[in-house]
Amino acid sequence: MAWQVRFTRDGRQRLAGVLRALLIAQLAISLVMVIFCYNVTVKVMSLLKNIHKVTVMLFYALLLLHAYCMKLHYTSGFRLISWLLRCPHWPRAAPVTRLWLISGCLVALNGLLVHAACKSTLKALMKELSSSLRIGISHYLSEPTWKRIMDTMQVELNCCGVESPSDWHEIPWINMDFLNEDSELVMKLSGTDGKALPPVSPYSCCSPHVLAACCHDPLQQFEDSWWGSAAGATLSARSCRDAVGAPLARAALAIHTLSALALVLQLVVVMVTQLVVRSALQAVARGDWTGHHDRESVRDRE
């Protein structure tokens, strides 16, 4: 019975206005999704593109493709509304409207699939990032590219190490050539692979929030107390994996939330569109219609 409600001409215009507002809301969702995810992840992704360029491009490609599909679908809805109001006796109005509604539901559901794909992509990225950064630490002094990547990431994100700042003390990255081999302490820290494991971190691990001298190299700065806690207090406590994962997690949450909202709005769009179609057809059946084609038919009879 709800579908048999009659609308006046002004009522049909207001109903079409509601449908247009819903489509604008859907377009706003796609725009907010792209802008928010880009602003949240741009710093992190600009750093990761030097390590995992393909994965970074895949994440942005999925996001932009979904947003463009939403834009294409809902902008075509404005044209469809105009046709439904002007030409309700168009023979293909019902099948075209039905096809448009089905495609809209698929686009809305695709948002959840995009979220799942982005989530799995980011999960794989984080897994690959951990192994890549460990390689970067081990080649920090031997390859200038890795030194630049690690220093830039730790300074820009205010982080240190892969899983924790102690990774610099557990992954061999300092060759014995950089140390005094005559020192008894250095010989105790040396390994069989020609590298040592002193409690030394690069300068990029220094925290900008500590108003004191950074003890990133207590072996040289404070030789008598390098086992103390002075070094750890002046270094960034957050790991680079957490620094990278936090904005990516916010982006994934935004995609999930906005996609779910778009799906809910799509259900409302389906109901309102059905009302617009039925009210227009009922208006034609009652003769309460002065559309463009009706004026042409009257002119032809004259």
Image (tube, rainbow, N blue to C red):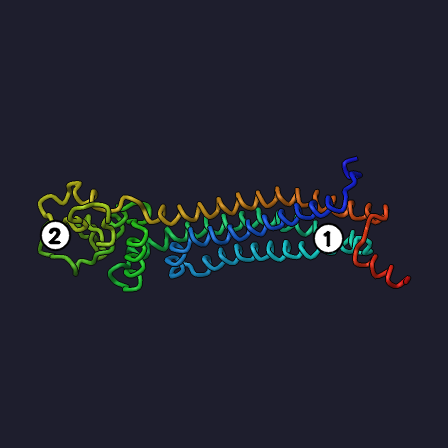
Residue 284 in percent (x, y) is at 83, 49
Residue that protrudes farthest toward the right in the picture = 301
Query: 176 or 209: nearer the eye?
Result: 209
Residue corresponding to mark 2 = 220
Residue at image position (49%, 55%) is: 59
Residue type marked 2: Gln
Kind of element beneath mark 1: helix
The answer to which quarter of the image holds residue 44 is bottom left
Residue at image position (81%, 51%) is: 289
294 relative to 49 in the view: left or right: right
173 relative to 252 in the view: left or right: left
Q: Is residue 196 above or below residue 229?
A: below
Residue that protrudes farthest toward the front in the picture = 302
**Real-space CA distance between mark 2 and mark 1, rounded to the nearest whole angstrom:** 73 Å
The answer to which quarter of the image holds residue 56 is bottom left
Query: 136 or 90: nearer the eye?
Result: 90
Residue at image position (33%, 46%) is: 163
225 relative to 52 in the view: left or right: left
Q: Which mark, residue 21?
A: none
Quadrant, the C terminus: bottom right
Kind of element beneath mark 2: helix
Query: 34 or 128: nearer the eye?
Result: 34
The number of callouts visible is 2
Quadrant, the N terminus: top right
Residue 252 in percent (x, y) is at 48, 47
Residue 269 in percent (x, y) is at 67, 45
Q: Which mark, residue 99?
A: 1
111 relative to 273 in the view: left or right: left
